[in-house]
Amino acid sequence: MNILLLGSGGREHTFAWKIAQSPLCSKLFIAPGNAGTDALGVNVYLNVLDFDAIAEFSLKESISMIVVGPEAPLVEGIADYFSSNPRLSDIQIIGPNAKAAQLEGSKAFSKVFMEKYNIPTAGYKEFTAETSEAGKAYIEQSNTPIVLKADGLAAGKGVLILDDKEEAKTELDNMLNGKFGSAGSTVVIEEFLDGIEFSVFVLTNGKDYVLLPEAKDYKRIGEGDTGLNTGGMGAVSPVPFVDSVLMEKVRTRIIEPTIKGLAADKIHYEGFIFFGLIKVGDEPMVIEYNCRMGDPETEVVIPRLKNDLVELFKAMKDDTLGQQEIAFESDSAATVMLVSGGYPEAYEKGKVMTGLDLKTDSILFHAGTKKSANDIITNGGRVLAITSLAESKDSALEQSKSIAEKISFEGKYFRTDIGFDL
Ligand code: AMP
Ligand code: GLY
């Protein structure tokens, strides 16, 4: 079958790498893709939010399956757009409809949902401009730190964790007054959870699910988890503290109530669910849901998956997902992200990259790159994810770091301590 993959980051290069290995895939298109996906399929220039253009292209190229990498097209309703048009409804969309994508698209929606189905998460209240005074009173009687979250999508920037109550009140006003645009017109104020974070991923058709390997990502720019938040500077899988006892709690208290709760609420969910979790004492709690795979978590999860990913996607539609046995490499995977100097603040693009053709067992997943004449140049803040598999996470990390040293572009920066706290 012909498959269209939407997105342009390291997550999408990883999906393309995996999909291209499937005998079920005849032709792979990636929109818009990057210099890495270009070697695995055909990059096509389509805006991931231009559903008319994606539909026209899909009909022209006899696409049977569209794999949606990022959240924005899902929250904007790409699955609904295809399912509601009889000419397009046979095309399988890997990703939930707009209502189901609210698990990520609205923090308030996800908190109400978790409360309804007793899924462990931080206590909270939501506020709008009309109730801002009540919000300030709530801050006054809360413990610090205080967590403020813009309700809507804010490109990963909509969460503030503040130690000072007066600052929290000011920031509440700023958010309600448009600091994060309309994403902040409702603000969730929640209790701070003190623990260690990890992520769990499932693929579901709304009824059955398969559990993928867990991962832990490193979001801060600086060594030792310091400095500004980024999209993710590296990741490891498996996560040593996630033992079978903890995983059983995650399954029975979080994953299964989520899938059953969605079905009970008549919200049809087809796609990945990314559970952003935190272990508080011995108990897992939900920090957030995402309606897609993580980036750079995908770069360590998918290389460990032995199954044919396209076969798993197909099983969702054929209603055979419940019979699929998931198998993964016992080896550890670590990925190290090379980023542009200055990221996550202002940075320059267009720097020529060298060393990409070196011989290595590591996998180079392009994140922000593009071709320019005979060169590959940087084209984003996160540029390249270097994934290695080895018997231990430490040796996987060492391998990735040694490759990171050998690839060059002006301003290159990476963290050397991915997995330091495990
Ligand atoms: P989110 O966008 O909800 O994932 O939040 C971004 C980051 O903020 C998370 O990965 C956590 O590190 C942190 N965070 C969010 N909510 C809480 C909370 N209730 N307690 C502690 N940390 C949190
Ligand atoms: N790495 C976190 C995310 O994809 O949201």
Image (tube, rainbow, N blue to C red):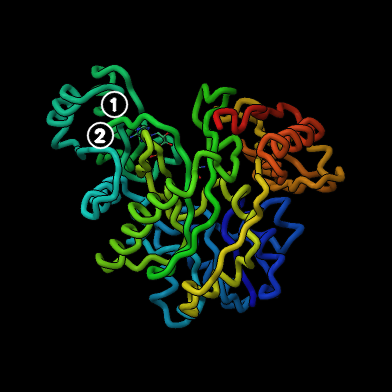
Q: Is residue 316 above or below residue 149?
A: below
Dot 1: within a 10 Å radius of its alpha carbon, few (fewer than 14), some, or many (20 or more) residues? many
Ranked by sequence position, the earlier of labels 1 and 2 is 1
Which quadrant of the rendered structure holds the N terminus? bottom right
Q: Which quarter holds ligand 1?
A: top left
Q: Is residue 190 above or below residue 330?
A: above
Residue pictured at 32% horizontal, 49% vertical: 106
Q: Is residue 276 above or below residue 223?
A: below
Position of 345 compared to 30: left or right? Answer: left
State the separation of the CA atoms marked 1 and 2.
7 Å
Position of 391 compared to 375: left or right? Answer: left
Residue pictured at 27% horizontal, 32% vertical: 191
**Tag of residue 51:** none
Residue, far bottom: 86
Q: Amino acid at mark 2?
A: Ile
Task: Judge whether residue 384 can be spotted in this image.
Answer: no
Could you tell me residue 365's position as x and y percent?
69, 48
Could you tell me residue 338's position as x and y percent?
68, 35
Q: Amino acid at mark 1?
A: Ile
Position of 344 compared to 291: left or right? Answer: right
Task: Judge whether residue 244 can be spotted in this image.
Answer: yes
Could you tell me residue 397's position as x and y percent?
69, 35
Residue pictured at 66% horizontal, 45% vertical: 333
Q: Secondary structure at mark 2?
A: strand
Dot 2: within a 10 Å radius of its alpha carbon, few (fewer than 14), some, or many (20 or more) residues? many
Label 2 belongs to which residue? 189
Please tell me which residue lies in front, 138 or 217. 217
Label 1 belongs to which residue? 146
